[in-house]
Amino acid sequence: LSLSDVAEQVRRGEAFLVVPHLRPDVDALGSSLGLAAVLRALGKQASVFVPGKLPRSVAFLVSGASITTSVPAGVRFDATFVLDTATPDLVPAGLPEVDRRGPLIVLDHHAVHDDFGDLVVRDDAASATAELVVALARELGLSSLPAACATPLYAALAADTGGFRYPSTSASTLRLGAELLDAGAEAWPVAQQLFEVWPMPRLRLLAALIDGLETDFDGRLAWLRVSRALMREVGVDDDQVDGLVNYGRMLEGVEVSVLLWEWPAEAGAQATKLSLRSNGEVDVAQLARVFGGGGHRAAAGALAPLSMERTAARLRAELELVFRVSGP
Ligand SMILES: [Mn+2]
């Protein structure tokens, strides 16, 4: 860890660009908004850059001018933070040239990752990137957390721990959650946004997914499949498919849940997105790696340049090895 080096960059600088990964999730965007609030509390300028359409699931974090969809022209940044990002492939396009963006500072908690960035603080023991943002705030001498960072950082923590339930939830995670509530975050409105408020089409999609659920390897594996035709039929976009893989893991006896998701074809080429969840026994980040993806031990994903059936066959071959090695 080089938190003190990062803190030194912050002390020396005036203006910072803050960037979450492409199609940001709640930890990526919440950590970015939280970091921007911390920087502003220290008297610095901070811009959070999120190009393109914001996923519906994170829209509640954004109000007014808290993000920008294009890098402000004419500003020279002293450094650019990239948050919750394990690979340069997920850094959004459109960052300024190096003389205008300064060094790339990566704050991340993915166990499987590529080496990139000029200064890297990566801690796979952190339950969320939000924890690293708070560690940096402390390194910078902020005695109390600014109110503006409370909700985004609390939401990030709650999202990546599944509502403070996953094995990554430690006593210090809960203490940090409490500190963020003290700073002004509200637990229930955040929980509603993260876990409770679903549009009808998403519930209908879940019903269809559960209807089509198949088990494999004596009930240790759950398969879920989403086709474009099903998505059209129930009226959902890609945002709303995210996270549904968790439902396969709920089934008693399931160790790994797989969601295969037909991805929009580009230039006639077929592609399938894989979402993987494990109960902790099987390291699904390693499985995702086979398809060029990544993630965490219990939650990972990849985009395979294959049809859904060929992706399933390839994955099943990998899983045969996993389940044979780990035994019944
Ligand atoms: Mn994260």
Image (spheres, rainbow, N blue to C red):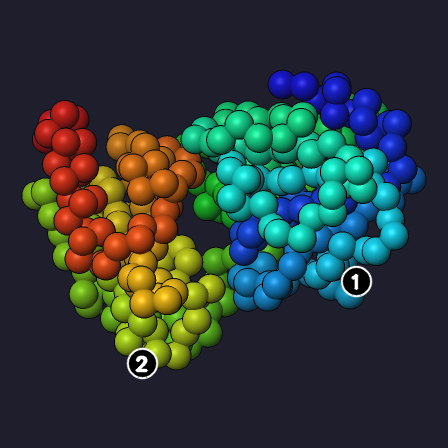
Q: Give the left or right position of residue 251, taking residue 173 as reference.
A: left
Residue occupied by mark 2: 233
Asked which quadrant contains residue 321, the reply is: top left
- The answer to whether residue 173 is above or below residue 101 is above
Q: Residues within 10 Å of mark 2 (few under 14, many from 20)?
A: few
**Marker disc for residue 178:** none
Q: Secondary structure at mark 1?
A: loop
- The answer to whether residue 310 is above or below residue 292 is below
Asked which quadrant contains residue 204, the reply is: bottom left
Asked which quadrant contains residue 23, the reply is: bottom right
Q: Secondary structure at mark 2?
A: helix
Q: Residues within 10 Å of mark 1 (few under 14, many from 20)?
A: few
Q: Nearer the viewer, residue 284 or 93?
A: 93
Q: Give the left or right position of residue 74, taking residue 150 as reference.
A: right
Separation (CA) of disc 1 from disc 2: 35 Å
Q: Amino acid at mark 2?
A: Glu
Give me the residue at 46% from left, 74% from top: 199
- Residue 197, x across and y down, in percent: 50, 67
Give me the residue at 87% from left, 32% from top: 13
For the C terminus, the image quarter is: top left
Q: Amino acid at mark 1?
A: Ala
The earlier-in-sequence mark between 1 and 2 is 1
Residue occupied by mark 1: 65
- Residue 215, x across and y down, in percent: 13, 52
Number of labels in the image equals 2
Q: Give the left or right position of residue 302, taking residue 148 as reference.
A: left
Q: Give the left or right position of residue 186, taking residue 316 as reference.
A: right
Of all residues, the one furthest to the front in this rendering is 267
